Image (spheres, rainbow, N blue to C red):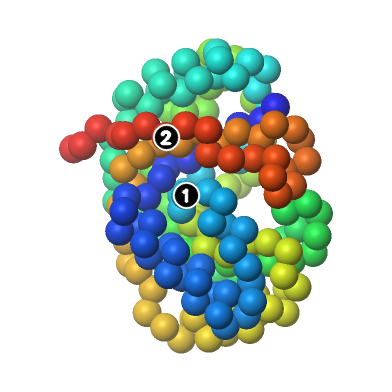
Amino acid sequence: MKATIVLVGNTDTQNCGAKLMLEANRLGNTGFEMARLPFHVSLKQTFVINDIGEFEKFFDEFGSTVSQMTIPFEKLVLSPNNAIGGTPSGVMALRATRTEELDALQKRFFNKLTDRFGPCPAEHDNDYIFHMTIAIGKAPYENYVRAYEELITRPMPKSLCFDKLAFFYYDDNSITAGTYFCYKIIDLKKH
């Protein structure tokens, strides 16, 4: 079993992400794999959990201490990726600006997680680049390039609001389509 903890965008952010995902698909046939999850910014990549019930209690406790935030974004980015079932493909995302607020929240989450469960290593714990994925999946990388080259000529959002925390659950370690989903979402405190 694995988990990922993420900030989930408000309604306007969800609508923005869906429109960008649809446009990327229209331009490059990139698919709708991203529609499986709400549009989000991860605090930590997938890590092993041993007991979903115990982890859910921790998630609820931590979430009750987090406030909603507006995250600034720098630009649209594209990278090769084979995260979905190991198939060579692409990932298109809005790169977030690393802010003190976001850094502090991530550090606090890492510390609380370690205090409760011991080391929970994940890929990119030390070099994670905050982002909101808008397209990922099984389409050939060339499809992503085609969509990206058109989308970078268009205005992108400068900031988006994230007002929920979510717990993504992976029932096995493969992270293939159909093995993961958004298990729980909680509302964050308003400022």
Three-letter code for the amino acid on which mark 1 is drawn: Pro
Residue 103 visible at all: no
Direction from residue 111 to residue 174 in the image, left or right = right
Mark 1 crowd level (few <14, some 14–19, many ≥20, 10 Å Cα):
many
* Label 2: element kind: strand
Where is residue 39 drawn, in percent x and y?
A: 46, 53
Q: Nearer the viewer, residue 114 or 33?
A: 33
**Relative to residue 30, is residue 7 depicted above or below?**
above
**Relative to residue 123, is residue 2 depicted above or below?**
above
State the quadrant of the C terminus: top left
Callouts 2 and 1 close, C-beta under 8 Å:
yes
Q: Nearer the viewer, residue 142 or 171?
A: 171
The numbered dot on residue 185 is 2
Where is residue 58 drawn, in percent x and y?
A: 47, 18
**Relative to residue 43, is residue 10 depicted above or below?**
below
Residue at the extreme front: 178
Where is residue 120 drawn, in percent x and y?
A: 64, 25
State the quadrant of the N terminus: top right
Q: CA distance from mark 2 to mark 1?
A: 10 Å
**Residue occupying the point 80% across, 60% down:** 87
Question: Which residue does the numbered mark 1 point to in the structure image?
Answer: 38
